[in-house]
Image (cartoon, coloured by chain):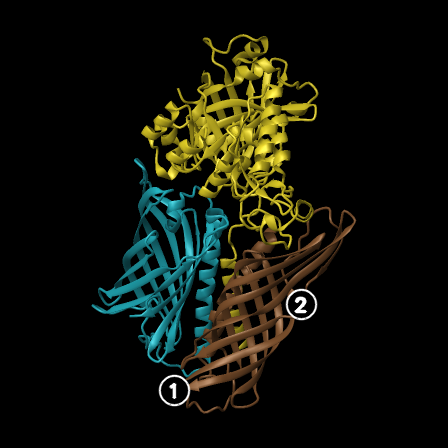
């Protein structure tokens, strides 16, 4: 065989490897663009006062930029408390391909500035976003505290980019009406979203829970397991694996290790430590506006410990004047048996099983899987008994629209809470 | 992690297709091969061949440790062992099963001023295909599961295991020493894809044509 | 990975293969007496992937199993492979054109594709084909947690390049594009459908056909799919608009 033929065969092998090697990398996170304009970062830029924040909330019509966000968007403020600092974020929820914006606000004179990033959760598209409300297009009126409704509508004029570049594509939102205020639970899966959606925080981490309300959530679902020494922690999968964790050499289950071993040797995908249930509830209560926590039971035995923590934080929330529902999730017969053994009516539960089981254990929430359909009559019967009905885990934007428009649910659990938020707040 | 993933996929593709391409291209120019004994009379059409051996392995994937660990020391070397049973039919393609044991890696560190040590090994359970390239050289490719064993010594010792999908490719040179026995040198690549563990192993193997029939 | 990068890689690869083929052919001719150019004779063995004209009214078929490893993004920790039956049947329509049908089924995951191929040998060892398959997938899932059904229509334009190593060893490289034509799904009483043609991704298949034992021949193959939508996982209603990697292994025996 000639040298030339050896060379050609080697090339064939290398090129084939190159071709097959272009598989998607699932672990990388989509970076959050952090570019801000000089005006936004200048000393003259002042934080927005609270009444002005509320005045900007609403449903807006989209003129420029509809190809990215659709014809309508919902703007809603949320906050995060860290230490003595409270940061307010303006989220823009859309009905198109799970696109959302997260913006911060400043005031320079009578002009309002909003800057941040946008992200499409169905894929990895992201970019910088900047908006202004010029003084003559509502800025002066908002700063003076006048009502936003009137002859001259509030207009957010903005631009966005792809990636961490200067924004150049136009987008314009014009105020239409206030947000829908009907009570509805917008529940974020795994503390806010999945690691596989390449969010800037790992699922079931404290960092993800801090992010959840910016993604549209009013409540979260989290997965509880016990370590070998009986500490309830947040972790979804049965096994320690590279879907959720950085490589460490440790395999097996959470229950194989003590909390000290886990917290020392293991990190979640984006470097966070596996949090304890107590740590998470403290974060929810003291740092976020979240109003509901669904404790999904991934353990066998130990429900008394979870119940005690649930009660401690319900009391703490009541003492703070905070509305916070904490529900023990009952996904299977084993967890129902554990719950029945508690025989504690003061521990509210959410049951995923049949309606008969919901009534037997007197669960305050029934949570059927969305793939069972809308089940309108059953839902109405349970609502008549004073129970709420949530469905899970609904991500398909087309089905979300149908379930929001036609369904009778009191809440929806999703990996895309921003889509649920759009259909809820923009609903009439 | 990203670079590592791409390299693994790239290498997997290259080795798999390499098996196909090299075998195909070379097989045409040579007579029907026999990796046990070059002059063995082809009286039996079928054979069961046992391969058993050991050698040295080098872990080829990145080793990652948690932030905050100090004085980290890693070890990539190990001593693997292989047992393989192959059915040699009357054509090029051979099929069989393989198991054995291989060290992946180990590391030690100080965590909160206390010593911590992690040791990872694997037991492959693979369906293996093989094709001869020349009279003495054969390529092997396998797919199946790796049973990963992990031992943590930090406070209490914890021994756990997990199953990962995985691959194997190998190239082997066999020197016959009798009608039924041969000695082989094998270069092998293990890849447990779900746990991101890969190693190269160089082994000396005994090849025994255990049973033949027509 | 953006699709254009995949296509770029695929194009470079195909161009290189042609260069290899040409180079090998030229090299071979330099060392041989000048003879009239010959075209590949019909392989002395059955084949279903190798792109060689089947001949009018001839049948060929294989039956085996296919294994797809799902990406973690879709099936999360349950990254298990459930085998599907895999039946391929070819039927010659004319000298160069034949019909290729593939049924791969498992109950929940079922897919039938059928389409014409035009095949032509271009040298002593190389043969090419182009084709276009229509795929129909469908499944029903009813249990205590599911009341779903779905079906859809796909289209796969394909190009295959075959290299006959010898009359008893056939290598095939097949490239395909995946177009989604129609999707219907129903959950309870709520139904959705999409009927806009959408480019979902692309795939590359390497297949090896050769004798196994006695007069039995075997087909071994590897298919690398990079696609937004994979019909096999319809029941999970995945929403990713990202081209995920689905490796697929298949083995077949000829009928």
* Residue drawn at 50 percent across, 78 percent down: B133
Q: Horizontal placement of A84 versus A418: left or right? A: right
Q: Which residue is mark 2?
A: B78
Quarter of the image where one finds residue A308: top right
Q: Horizontal placement of B143 versus A166: left or right? A: left
Q: Residue furthest right?
A: B113
Q: Horizontal placement of A282 versus A21: left or right? A: right
- How far apart, in angstroms, are the residues tagged by discs 1 and 2? 41 Å
Q: Nearer the viewer, residue C249 or A343?
A: A343
The mark that comes first in sequence, 1 or 2, is 2
Quarter of the image where one finds residue A412: top left
Q: Residue furthest left?
A: C57
Q: Determine crowd level at label 1: few under 14, some 14-19, many 20+ residues with C-alpha closer than 10 A.
A: few
Q: Quadrant of the C terminus of chain B?
A: bottom left
* Residue drawn at 43 percent across, 89 percent down: B42
**Residue A368: x and y, percent?**
40, 36
Q: In the rendered image of this protein, which colour is used for chain C?
A: cyan
Can residue A32 be seen at all in this image of the molecule?
no
Can residue A141 be seen at all in this image of the molecule?
yes
Q: In the rendered image of this protein, which colour is used for chain B?
A: brown
Q: In the rendered image of this protein, which colour is used for chain A?
A: yellow
Q: Chain of mark 1?
A: B
Compared with residue C68, is residue A310 higher up or lower down, i.e. above or below?
Answer: above
Tag of residue B214: 1
Secondary element at tag 2 = strand
Q: Horizontal placement of A246 versus C49: left or right? A: right
């Amino acid at each position: 065989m000639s040298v030339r033929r050896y060379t050609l065969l080697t090339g064939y092998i290398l090129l084939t490897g190159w071709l097959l090697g272009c598989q998607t990398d699932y672990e990388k996170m989509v970076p959050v663009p952090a570019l801000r304009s000089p005006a936004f970062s200048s000393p003259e830029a002042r934080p927005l006062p609270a009444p002005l924040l509320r005045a900007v909330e609403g449903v807006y019509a989209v003129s420029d930029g509809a190809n990215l966000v659709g014809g309508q968007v919902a703007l809603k403020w949320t906050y995060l408390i860290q230490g003595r600092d409270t940061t307010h974020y303006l989220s823009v929820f859309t009905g198109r391909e799970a696109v959302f914006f997260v913006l911060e606000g400043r005031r320079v004179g009578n002009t309002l500035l909003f800057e941040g990033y946008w992200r499409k959760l169905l894929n990895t598209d992201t970019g910088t976003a900047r908006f202004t409300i010029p003084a003559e297009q509502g800025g002066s009126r908002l700063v003076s505290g006048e009502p936003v409704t009137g002859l001259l509508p509030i207009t957010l004029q903005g631009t966005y980019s792809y990636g961490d570049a200067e924004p150049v594509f136009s987008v314009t939102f014009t105020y239409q009406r206030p947000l829908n205020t009907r009570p509805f639970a917008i529940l974020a899966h795994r503390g806010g979203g999945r690691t596989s959606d390449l969010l800037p925080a790992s699922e079931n981490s404290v960092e993800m829970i801090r992010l959840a309300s910016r993604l549209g959530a009013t409540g979260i679902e989290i997965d509880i397991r016990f370590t070998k020494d009986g500490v309830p922690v947040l972790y979804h999968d049965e096994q320690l694996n590279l879907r959720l964790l950085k490589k460490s050499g440790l395999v097996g289950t959470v229950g194989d290790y003590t909390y000290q071993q886990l917290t020392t040797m293991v990190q979640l995908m984006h470097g966070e430590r596996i949090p304890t249930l107590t740590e998470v509830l403290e974060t929810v209560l003291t740092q976020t506006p979240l109003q509901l926590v669904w404790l999904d039971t991934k353990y066998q035995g130990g429900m008394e410990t979870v119940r005690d923590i649930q009660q401690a934080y319900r009391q703490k929330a009541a003492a703070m004047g905070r509305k916070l529902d904490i529900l023990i999730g009952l996904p299977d017969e084993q967890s129902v048996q554990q719950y029945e053994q508690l025989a504690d009516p003061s521990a509210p539960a959410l049951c995923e099983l049949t309606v008969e089981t919901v009534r037997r254990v007197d669960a305050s929430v029934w949570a059927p899987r969305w793939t069972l359909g809308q089940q309108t009559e059953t839902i109405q019967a349970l609502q008549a008994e004073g129970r709420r009905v949530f469905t899970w885990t609904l991500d398909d934007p087309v089905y979300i629209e149908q379930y929001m428009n036609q369904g009778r649910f009191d809440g929806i659990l999703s990996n895309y809470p921003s889509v649920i938020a759009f259909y809820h707040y923009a609903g009439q | 992690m990203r670079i590592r993933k791409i390299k693994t996929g790239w290498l997997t593709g290259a080795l798999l297709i390499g098996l196909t391409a090299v075998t195909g291209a070379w097989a045409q120019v040579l007579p029907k091969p026999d990796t046990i004994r070059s002059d063995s009379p082809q009286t039996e059409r079928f054979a069961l061949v046992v391969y058993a051996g050991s050698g040295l392995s080098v872990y080829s994937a990145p080793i990652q440790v948690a932030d905050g660990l100090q004085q980290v020391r890693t070890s990539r070397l190990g001593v693997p062992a292989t047992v393989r049973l192959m059915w040699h039919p009357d054509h090029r393609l051979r099929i069989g099963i393989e198991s054995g044991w291989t060290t992946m890696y180990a590391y030690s560190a100080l965590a909160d001023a206390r010593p911590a040590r992690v040791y990872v090994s694997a037991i492959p359970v693979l369906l293996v295909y093989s094709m001869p390239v020349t009279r003495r050289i054969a390529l092997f490719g396998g797919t199946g599961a790796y049973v990963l064993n992990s031992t943590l010594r930090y406070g209490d010792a914890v021994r756990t295991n997990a199953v990962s999908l995985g691959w194997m490719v190998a190239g082997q040179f066999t020197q016959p020493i009798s009608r039924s026995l041969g000695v082989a040198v094998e270069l092998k690549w293990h890849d447990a894809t779900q746990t991101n563990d890969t190693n190269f192993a160089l082994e000396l193997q005994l090849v025994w044509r255990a049973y033949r029939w027509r | 990975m953006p699709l254009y990068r995949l296509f770029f890689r695929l194009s470079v690869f195909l161009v290189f293969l042609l260069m290899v083929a040409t180079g090998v052919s030229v090299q071979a001719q330099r060392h041989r007496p000048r003879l009239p150019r010959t075209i590949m004779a019909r392989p002395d063995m059955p084949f279903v992937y190798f792109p060689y004209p089947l001949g009018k009214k001839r049948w060929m078929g294989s039956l085996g199993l296919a294994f797809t490893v799902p990406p973690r993004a879709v099936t999360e920790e349950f990254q298990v492979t459930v085998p599907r039956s895999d039946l391929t049947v070819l039927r010659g329509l004319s000298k160069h054109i034949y019909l290729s049908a593939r049924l791969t089924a498992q109950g929940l995951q079922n897919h039938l594709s059928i389409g014409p191929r035009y095949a032509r040998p271009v040298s002593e060892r190389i043969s090419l084909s182009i084709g276009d398959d229509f795929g129909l997938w469908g499944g029903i899932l009813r249990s205590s947690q599911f009341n779903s059904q779905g079906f859809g229509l796909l289209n796969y334009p394909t190009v295959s390049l075959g290299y006959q190593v010898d009359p008893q060893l056939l290598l095939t490289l097949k490239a395909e594009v995946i177009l989604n034509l129609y999707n219907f799904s129903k959950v309870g009483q709520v139904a959705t459908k999409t009927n806009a043609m959408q480019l979902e991704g692309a795939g590359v298949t390497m297949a090896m056909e050769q004798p196994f034992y006695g007069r039995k021949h075997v087909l071994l193959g590897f298919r690398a799919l990079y696609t937004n939508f994979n019909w096999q996982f319809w029941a999970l209603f995945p929403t990713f608009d990202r081209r995920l990697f689905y490796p697929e292994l298949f083995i077949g025996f000829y009928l």
